[in-house]
Image (tube, rainbow, N blue to C red):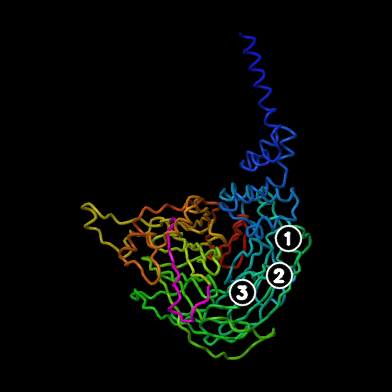
Amino acid sequence: MDSVASLDCGVRLTAHPASILKLPAEIMLEILSLLDVSDLLEVRQTCMVICRLSQDRSVWLRMLLNRRSQVPIPPPYDGDPIKSTHTMSPEALERLVLSIYYTEHSWLLPRAPPILLGLPDQPTNVHISEQGGNAALLMDVLADRWLLVVYVEGLVRIWDLYVQGTTPASTYRRAGLLPQIDCCFSLQLSIDSPLSSACASMNEEGTAILITPVSQSTFTVLGVQLPSSAGIHVTRQLDIIADMTHVWRLPSPTLMVRAIHPASRLAFFSYSDTLVLLQWDCGKVWQLRTIDQVVDEEIWTGITDAKFVSPRHILCVKTHDVELLTLPSTFAPQPGLPKCSVFDTDMPCEHIPIRASPHFFGLTFRGVSMSEAQITPGGRHAETRVRISFLAYDILRGLFHYRVSVLLPPTAATDGIMHDEPPPHMSVRLLAVHRLAQLYATTGEAATNVPRSRSGFTPGSRGFVSACFMGRTGKRGVWIERRRGSMQRNVIAFSTALDALGEEDAADDGLENTPGGRTGGQSDSETDQQDWTLHSEARPIDGRVIYEVNSYDLRDDITRCAFAEAMGTVILGNRKGDLKLL
């Protein structure tokens, strides 16, 4: 009996590994692709057969597709991974997935001291001091690679965050190395007054950066053409060609550019309650006037940030509310003029009616950062779904993370009458909050004798936010916080909770039932809105301090931040113009 049991045990021990290795290769590849990256790296060390299978291209492509819905993927692989990685070798695809994996597990860890970004060797026609005073007007990272900084004095600079065009700077930083980040473009604009605002965006092909600075009364469109070879094989200093395409004189010297739509050549401006739309390739100007009655006009609210959802829809985050502006169905951009170097003429202005669908907050937003619009096209007979996330901070109450979901009507032909077109649906949902003050007590004898402020909060006991930045896809964010009574500044980073990302489809399916997410021109009362925003069980933003700095000199105070979301590279800017990379 013992010999039979011993024999049976021996058979099981030898048959188990042999049966796995004898499985068909396609089944083994399917099993390996379902593993986590760390598990795959462990399993490949067991034997040569599994090691060779783990190097198959299909395994790493499947992992890339699986991670795309949970973490940011660097362009151009985030659009169509199968197409964009078609020419990549298995080794290069493996390095890409490993870079995404290591970034995911390390970007919330404390950082080493930052490195100062270098200036170009020979700046072109720089009229300002390099010792300080370079006030950054716009600071952004485009395509998770190009750091763009536009200064008030008219200086435009671009840094390449890929070392020698091949490896992200974050890879060097994780290895404890100090990468050399080159300033590959520097241009001094010919302006007669300081810049007041600026916007930037990649063009629809992703081959150029469009920059639109505005001075006292002039709107300029600057096209920065990226080299066609910009990719993983570039090993030399990048040559970037600038093309000054258009210069227009604005109808009002106080207008500020809020958003641009490169495909339609449209720029959106605002000042107070004045809204202006400009098509820069033909000089056509429209002044926008809302035809809907605004429900709450007790407090003035101005635009803080805006994004084009489509050529006919603009999402505006304002001081006290968020609005979706809808242009008439008959609106269409005009045919463009032949390419010219400069247009310097006064432009006639037409008036067109627009719909405004507001959603009011019981908050006062001082700073806002919006993600890019994530668009799911619906075609001619289905609704188009758009999602935008934004960070906004209230000085007294804290930092708030919202998601706006929009359903646009089908693009089928209409009768040309604006009121006959189905209105878009908008839902605003609070994902998480980082509170910076404490609520007053609402019950008990002590509460009756304590004077209540209008905000409903005690004097702030924690600190305040001085800058915030939402990632390109809305899955990661960064903010700068200062503790009250301290000179210490904290750089805090966070990732959007995975369960919040998984709730997107459910939120879109029930837009009208989402708390605080009414559609059309409907909005909550101020009391209900305050109860929902301030007293609900909103999840806290799970922020991690990645860097601390003491700023005893106000010139060293961090006023701006930006970061390459997919690579986790954070760039800090202070008042005197220094740029530091974490």
Quarter of the rendering containing residue 476 = bottom right
Query: Any magenta on residue 428?
Result: yes
User: Relative to residue 537, is residue 117 depicted above or below?
Assistant: below
Distance between the Cα atoms at labels 2 and 1? 17 Å
Q: Secondary structure at mark 3?
A: helix
Q: Are marks 3 and 1 in contact (CB under 8 Å)?
A: no
Q: Nearer the viewer, mark 2 or mark 3?
A: 3
Q: Are marks 2 and 1 in contact (CB under 8 Å)?
A: no
Q: Are marks 2 and 3 in contact (CB under 8 Å)?
A: no
Q: Secondary structure at mark 1?
A: loop
Q: Residue at x 75, y 34 (%)?
A: 48
Task: Identify residue for label 3.
Answer: 262
Q: Residue at x 66, y 79 (%)?
A: 189
Task: Identify residue for label 2.
Answer: 185
Check the picture and name the quadrant holding the N terminus: top right
At which x and y percent is residue 155? 65, 74
Task: Identify residue for label 1.
Answer: 231
Sooner in the amino-acid sequence: mark 2 or mark 1? 2
